[in-house]
Image (cartoon, coloured by chain):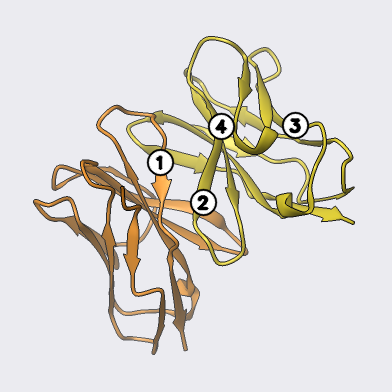
Amino acid sequence: KAGVTQTPRYLIKTRGQQVTLSCSPISGHRSVSWYQQTPGQGLQFLFEYFSETQRNKGNFPGRFSGRQFSNSRSEMNVSTLELGDSALYLCASSGDRVNTEAFFGQGTRLTVV
Amino acid sequence: AQSVTQLDSQVPVFEEAPVELRCNYSSSVSVYLFWYVQYPNQGLQLLLKYLSGSTLVKGINGFEAEFNKSQTSFHLRKPSVHISDTAEYFCAVSNTGNQFYFGTGTSLTVIP
């Protein structure tokens, strides 16, 4: 079956703009998590959605938000972009049971200039 | 709270030699442990996981790891590495929902 699909793969935005990233999970998976990966901070958990509800949230400012649709597709939005938001954003989908394997997409590389 | 420490940021090793990538975790509750691999410009791929049962876990590509509760460790091993094993390796723990805490990663370089 198809894997996790993230679009777009690459983005360049200007400081102050906003951006929306998309993630389509594996068919049948209702849990979608988002992570930010940077050289300095490594992989950091942003939030997790399950059946359209945010189930867990990491320690990121309110400029980072997300949502999940009824078909389990998820979007992540970052408003008022800062240079430090430049990162690889990874989406992971999981089955219904907790602590099962997370399947990762290839990520969206966001560059803020 | 949970945290993961990967003790080695870079590990160079000759082809066909054995390798061990170290991972220690801290948690006040039971955890589930994972090793992921990341190739350049790619997402993460699961190598192996420990949920319960046998403390020796075998994964893909010939990797294995041993869960040691008393030492709070989950070291990854491979008896003979190949050039294609060159990648970044991440240890992770999880105990609530599908929220994973990752280590800072170990860059494995296999030298021909």
**Which residue corresponds to mark 1?**
A102
| Residue found at x 68% / y 33% | B63
Badge 2 element: strand
Image location (x, y in percent) of residue B16: 87, 42
- Real-space Cα distance between discs 4 and 2? 12 Å
Disc 4 marks which amino acid?
Leu
Lower sequence index among marks 3 and 2: 2
Looking at the image, do the residues carrying marks 1 and 2 touch, with CB atoms under 8 Å apart? Answer: yes
- Real-space Cα distance between discs 1 and 3? 21 Å
- Real-space Cα distance between discs 3 and 4? 11 Å
B61 left or right, relative to B12: left
Chain under label 4? B
Image location (x, y in percent) of residue A61: 34, 61
User: Observer-nearest residue: B94 or B50?
Assistant: B50
Disc 2 marks which amino acid?
Leu
Discs 3, 4: same chain? yes
Image location (x, y in percent) of residue B30: 48, 17
Q: How many neighbours does mark 3 have within 10 angstroms: few (below 14), some (14-19), or many (20 or more)?
A: some
Lower sequence index among marks 3 and 4: 4
* Image position of B72 with respect to A94: above or below: above
* Disc ID at residue B77: 3
**What shade does chain B have?**
yellow
Discs 1, 3: same chain? no
Q: How many neighbours does mark 1 have within 10 angstroms: few (below 14), some (14-19), or many (20 or more)?
A: many
* Disc ID at residue B48: 4
User: Observer-nearest residue: B48 or B95?
Assistant: B48
Disc 3 marks which amino acid?
Arg
* Image position of A19 with respect to B55: above or below: below
**What shade does chain A have?**
orange
